[in-house]
Image (spheres, rainbow, N blue to C red):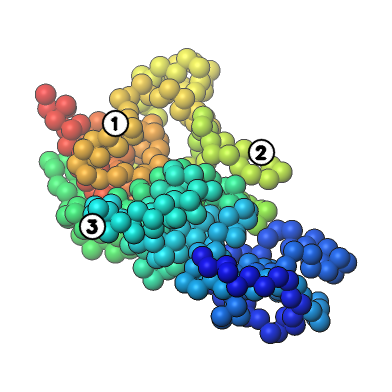
Amino acid sequence: MNINNFSGVEFVTPKSIFRNIELDNLYRLPKNYEMIRQNISTMGIITPLIVDSKSNTIVSGNLRHKIAVELRLPLIPVFFIDLGDDMRMVSLSSNVQRDKSSMEKYKEMMLYKSLFPSTKGQRNDLYPELILLKEERDIALSSIPKDTQNKLNSIGLMCKELFPDEPTKLEGFFNEIDNGKSSLNKVYKKVKRLKIKSNCKSEVPGGDFVTASSTIYNKSSEILSELENESISVVCSSPPYWAMKMYQLDANQLGQEATVEEYINNLKKHYLEAYRVLKKDGSVWVNINDCCKDGEYQLVPQRFVLMMKSIGFILNDEFQWLKQNPRPTGGKRSIRRHEPIFHFVKSNNFYYNEEWLKDCEDQNNSFSIGTTQDCPKLTSSLDFNGGVLKTGVASTRELKKKCEDRGVALDHQATFPIDVPMICLKLTSKPYDKILDIFNGTAMTGLAVIELGEGREYFGYEPSPEYMLASEIRLSEYELKMCA
């Protein structure tokens, strides 16, 4: 940096010098902007601005210049310095102590990278000036911890690949960090999972999955063209919940609608088809939950019931699934521990069997109640702590590990326990019945069908290739155990 022409403080009009657009784009207004403005209004500008004498461009002092223009100050103090090619470097280094957002840190890093493109593998002995470039870059970035630099850089690179036409996605992830909603490490892991999942979309072949007792179609359930009218005895499903933010990669994905009304209308397309394929004495079981948005619950379950009634379904029963590990519910309200499980039928002449309750051990009345063992009844609240039916539940953790071994990052977090479909099937299905899950996921309903056996046949619909592979792993391994 050449400062031989340093000329002392001069007082000039704000309009006679130019704002540094690069810094304007790099840094946001500080949170204490109004306080700074008030101080300058009262005391004037005490610290002179630094301005490049050749271009008349501000090197340090954009914020003070902005306030001076707003306050219409006639003159402001300025140091004019001949910086030459070092102007951008000094502009950045003058902001080292600034309190920066994650996006500002990232943009700053990218700007340093363009200024000093020294990379690993370059021959410093052939190009000794690269040593100086690297030293200057490292000094300039010393205020940002190395681990933070690496993670911010990785998030930026992955977002460019994942969302090339959606630059606001990157800012959204960084805002999660700055707003205290998540940590840098958690956001990094989240984006990394999306990246792995994106790679899987091109690497996992997808396609239908068929075994002796199961058929899963790799497609949406809006049109069940493979199933005949009134061919299914039981539909057991849990649709994607609305507004549960998952940063899905696919556009227009069910559950990511802008409004709850749109979500319910989209669900209706699926359950119209379910009504068509359901037998007259059949049953439909649905696990669906509400969400709190803009300070109030959205009545998703209630809206869903009204929609099902408009199709022609009859609401026969409602259970409350009592969860042991509910997700925290923010605001001035309790943590929502329960989720409804609705039982719909086509007519009042539906198949229903409670005889199996007589053979179950339920000493703590976790799911049944009765004066004697000869006449138990299900309770309306189901507590599945520990697995009330004493069934072999496939571990989600184990399934994730097996999927990773096959190159798939499984992010399915909403798997219900096997007890849910098991109770539904024991109540309303017979041997050799056909069972359907229109939102297959990782085939927990399919697992319950295989375990119950007695000639029951499972059909699922799942558009995700990753979940198709997870379903294949889950069902294939279990069928092998059954045959062993």
Q: Nearer the viewer, mark 3 or mark 2?
A: 3
Residue furthest to the bottom = 16
Q: Are marks 1 and 2 in contact (CB under 8 Å)?
A: no
Q: Is residue 212 visible?
A: yes
Q: Amino acid at mark 2?
A: Ser
The residue at 22%/44% (across/down) is 407
Q: Which residue is mark 2?
A: 334
Marks 3 and 1, the one that precedes in the sequence:
3
- Above or below residue 301? Residue 115 is below
Residue 20 in the image: state x and y as whole percent.
58, 74
Type of amino acid under label 3: Leu
Q: Which residue is mark 1?
A: 398
Q: Position of residue 57 (x, y in %)?
A: 59, 77
Residue nearest the observer in this picture, 229 or 324: 324
Disc ID at residue 470: none
| Secondary structure of the residue carrying numbered label 1 | helix
Q: Which mark is residue 126?
A: 3
**Residue at image coords 69%, 42%:** 333
How crowded pointer 2 is (Cα within 10 Å; few <14, some 14-19, many 20+) is rated as few
Q: Reply above or below: 460 against 229.
A: above
Q: Is 87 positioned to the left or the right of 479 in the image?
A: right
As rendered, which of 202 and 206 lies closer to the eye?
Answer: 202
Q: Residue furthest front?
A: 4
Kind of residue sitting beneath label 1: Glu
Give the vertical position of 83 relative to 54 (above or below): above
